[in-house]
Image (cartoon, grey):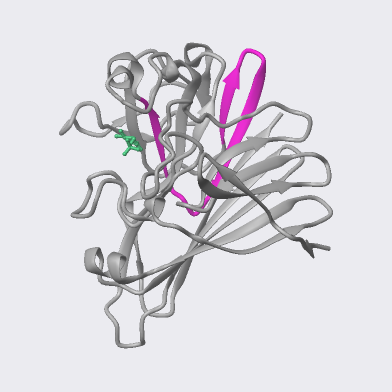
């Protein structure tokens, strides 16, 4: 049974965050800004998320790393700011509990004047972060909170997970073979099926895979990570590689070698909600 606990509120370079500690020692830290998970250490294990040491911890700007929440627009696929506004906004911590098997926190973001000026809809987002044993579970809920006669809205969303790797060229991502992907490094190029059973990263990679239906596995020579998702049909695989990384003010020159983004996303077919309707999607990371 879960017990409500006093959340352990901490300060990360001037920004408020909540630290979750499960009874078995697994931990996660969530920045209230953006409901951005910045750290995940499975029980008895090392850090599994990448956060750039050159991140600016600035109000209204996402930190470079962890798990930014992307909503209601992916990248520049619409009129809003890149990747939408949810990652830049202060979320509210609704509750925090420690149960027998995990510790969890629920954070919420609702529309306000600024979001309505950019995107004229009433919504509530909830992100539930649960950590315990070898697992991190992230569930995003979206609700249309407008009155019955409001317009429906549609959105894209992603959990933009930066996974920490020892050396990205040693890592292999399994489970994508046969899926059609768009190569965003070659705008306008046609969709193509993934030929490889074990994707190796050796150059700039920015791809959207559509219609994934099975768990992925990120294998490194010394460890593995299972990446499961529910109701997020698409997967984004991103690594900026050397030149783009060097041009990013918030990444160290060799940062691209320590990370691989594997994002659970809904992009190809945006979700449409009528007033009163809800949607949810989940990404789970399971360390071995
Ligand atoms: C990825 C996109 O999801 O996010 C990339 O596919 C993008 O194209 C990357 O560069 C990082 O975006 P940002 O806005 O956080 O720098």
Q: Which percent across, then down, holds residue 78?
A: 21, 53
Using the image, determine if residue 232 lies above or below residue 175: below
In the image, 279 versus 244, the foreground residue is 244
In the image, 58 versus 41, the foreground residue is 58
Q: Which percent across, then down, holds residue 16?
A: 55, 50
Q: Which percent across, then down, holds residue 99?
A: 80, 57
Res 283 visible: no
| Residue occupying the point 47% across, 12% down | 169
Using the image, determine if residue 42 lies above or below residue 129: above
| Residue occupying the point 39% across, 22% down | 195
Does residue 24 appear left or right of residue 286 in this picture? right
Q: Is residue 181 magenta?
A: no
Res 273 visible: yes
Using the image, determine if residue 186 lies above or below residue 63: above
| Residue occupying the point 32% across, 29% down | 206
Q: Magenta region: which residues? A: 216-239
Corner quadrant of residue 188 = top left
Corner quadrant of residue 100 = bottom right
Using the image, determine if residue 162 lies above or below residue 283: above
Q: Quadrant of ligand 1?
A: top left
Q: Main secondary structure of the magenta part?
A: strand
In the image, 265 versus 107, the foreground residue is 107
Does residue 181 appear left or right of residue 10 in this picture? left
Q: How many marks?
A: 0
Q: Which percent across, then down, holds residue 229?
A: 54, 46
- Location of the C terminus by quadrant is top right
Corner quadrant of residue 165 = top right
């Amino acid at each position: 049974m879960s017990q409500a606990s006093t959340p352990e509120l901490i300060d990360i370079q001037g920004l408020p965050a909540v630290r979750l500690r499960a009874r078995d020692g697994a931990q996660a830290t969530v920045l209230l800004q953006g409901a951005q998970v910045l750290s995940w250490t499975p029980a008895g294990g090392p850090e599994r998320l990448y956060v750039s040491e050159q991140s600016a911890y600035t109000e209204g700007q996402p930190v470079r790393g962890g798990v930014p929440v992307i909503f209601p627009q992916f990248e520049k696929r619409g009129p809003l700011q890149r990747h939408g506004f949810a990652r830049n906004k202060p979320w509210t911590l609704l509750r925090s509990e420690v149960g027998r098997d995990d510790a969890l926190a629920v954070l919420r973001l609702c529309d306000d004047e600024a979001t309505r000026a950019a995107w004229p809809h009433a919504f509530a987002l909830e992100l539930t972060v649960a950590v315990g044993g070898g697992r991190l579970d992230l569930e995003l809920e979206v609700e249309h909170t407008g009155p019955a006669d409001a317009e429906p809205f549609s959105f894209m969303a992603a959990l933009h997970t930066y996974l920490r790797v020892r050396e990205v060229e040693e890592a292999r991502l399994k489970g994508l073979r046969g899926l059609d992907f768009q190569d965003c490094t070659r705008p306008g190029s046609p969709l193509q099926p993934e030929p490889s059973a074990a994707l190796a990263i050796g150059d700039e990679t920015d791809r959207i895979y559509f219609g994934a239906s099975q768990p992925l596995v990120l294998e490194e020579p010394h460890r593995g990570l299972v990446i499961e998702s529910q109701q997020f049909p698409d997967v984004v695989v991103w690594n900026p590689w050397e030149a783009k990384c060097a041009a990013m003010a918030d990444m160290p020159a060799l940062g691209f070698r320590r990370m691989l983004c594997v994002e659970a996303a809904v992009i190809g077919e945006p979700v449409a909600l009528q007033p009163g309707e809800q949607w949810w999607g989940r990404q789970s990371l399971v360390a071995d």
